[in-house]
Image (tube, rainbow, N blue to C red):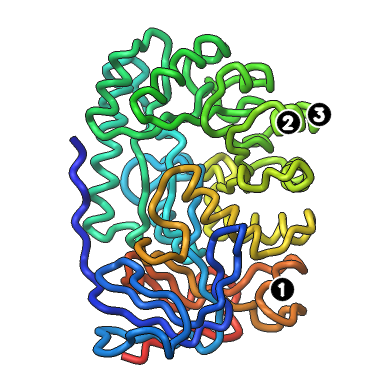
Amino acid sequence: MAVVAAAEKSGKVVIRGVGLMLSGDIDKPILDADTVVINDGLIVAVGREKDCDTAQAARVIDCKGSALSPGLIDSHTHPVFGDWTPRQSQLGWIESCMHGGVTTMISAGEVHLPGRPKDIVGVKALAITAQRAFDGMRAAGVGGGVKVLAGAPVIEKGMVEQDFADLAAAGVHLLGEIGLGSVKAGDEAAQMVAWARKYGIQSTIHTGGPSIPGSGLIDEEVVLEADADVIGHVNGGHTSLSYKAVCKLCEKSSRALEIVHNGNERIAILTARHAMELKCPHRVILGTDAPAGSGVQPLGMLRLIALISSLADIPAEIVFGFATGNISRMRKLPQGLIEVGRPADFVFLDKAQHSAGKDLLDSIRLGDIPGVGMVMIDGIVRCQRSRNTPPATEVPAIVH
């Protein structure tokens, strides 16, 4: 079985002076609260300062009226090993994304590993190794402490039910993108999705044209027949299906609609609008699909939030929920919502200096990305003012 990563304990932490608290829950996106109390990495109180026990804190952070959001969850990444991506020969990409507000990444397959094994024994071994390695990396504080949920095997022809049972028993809970391996037919994928689901393994399917050599077209009929838990990059990664085909996926499936940064921006906007019209915004989740041929986008999640809010005319507080609480619930994660008992994974934000917006939400509605003033994971400050975002108008201060 997988070993849970050990982590430094935060002790008691008080966050006060929050000007805007985004819950991550699109049904109630803004909380009537200005204070959060944390104990050993978990939220123990959310409310007004006068109503919270703030005494004897090991650390106090004054937000100075800036905003607090759950840390962003990137639903679609392709890590390999460590904080390195061979796709772009780049080091430090995970820690750099943390400076863009990302506190959790979810692997859609470790496909960029040079010489990636495609035999069934190798597929299983790589997934288990990646799961163990990234869990251990987080415990060591590498990658800025970002929670990288990895070990997502790319399924291949010849896999049988016992293979999925073996993976689950070893602690693997994800499948890589269906379609990046030799399994591309809807009926064959559906059988493996059913086996995965039986053993508690969540599945994602590639949608659209081929993204890398070896992948292929996965059209709407294959997606519907496979019935994976996540319709991966519904707006293409990079090449999208037609809008008519995407509408069919929105209307005929009940599965998660994943919109990514490294996809077709027009279809991203239209999909978000269509989900709102169909009254199924809870199905919308966001990711980057990085690293990829287009590179690593440390601000990809923030850019996608601004794109969808400004051009799809969806309130920014709702779009933040697409990147946090929706993913939390769909992926069955404890993080992603500001609620008692949840992990204290936060990004502290404010409008960028000199933005035309009157406040954070208005600036995003106008298309500007915000400034990140601090990032916290499990109650521990991982960075202060971001080196990657434009400077925030106001940044939180560590009082003690």
Sequence-wise, the earlier of marks 1 and 2 is 2
Q: Which mark is residue 244?
A: 3
Sequence-wise, the earlier of marks 1 and 3 is 3
Please rate how many residues cluster around mark 3, counting C-alpha atoms within 10 Å: few if below 14, some from 14 to 19, many from 20: few
Sequence-wise, the earlier of marks 2 and 3 is 3
User: Label 1: which residue?
Assistant: 363
Q: Residue at x 29, y 29 (%)?
A: 126
Q: Residue at x 56, y 54 (%)?
A: 323
Secondary structure at badge 2 equals helix
Q: Real-space Cα distance between discs 2 and 3? A: 11 Å
Rendering coords of residue 286 (x, y %): 58, 48
Please rate how many residues cluster around mark 2, counting C-alpha atoms within 10 Å: few if below 14, some from 14 to 19, many from 20: few
Q: Residue at x 41, y 25 (%)?
A: 197
Residue type at numbered disc 2? Glu
Secondary structure at badge 3 equals helix
**Which corner quadrant of the image does residue 293 belong to?**
top right
Q: Quadrant of the N terminus?
A: top left
Q: Nearer the viewer, mark 2 or mark 3?
A: 2
Is residue 40 visible in this depiction of the protein?
yes
Secondary structure at badge 1 equals helix
Which of the two residues, 114 or 311, is positioned nearer the viewer here? 311
Q: Real-space Cα distance between discs 1 and 2? A: 32 Å
Q: Is residue 334 above or below residue 232?
A: below
Which of the two residues, 361 or 132, is positioned nearer the viewer here? 361
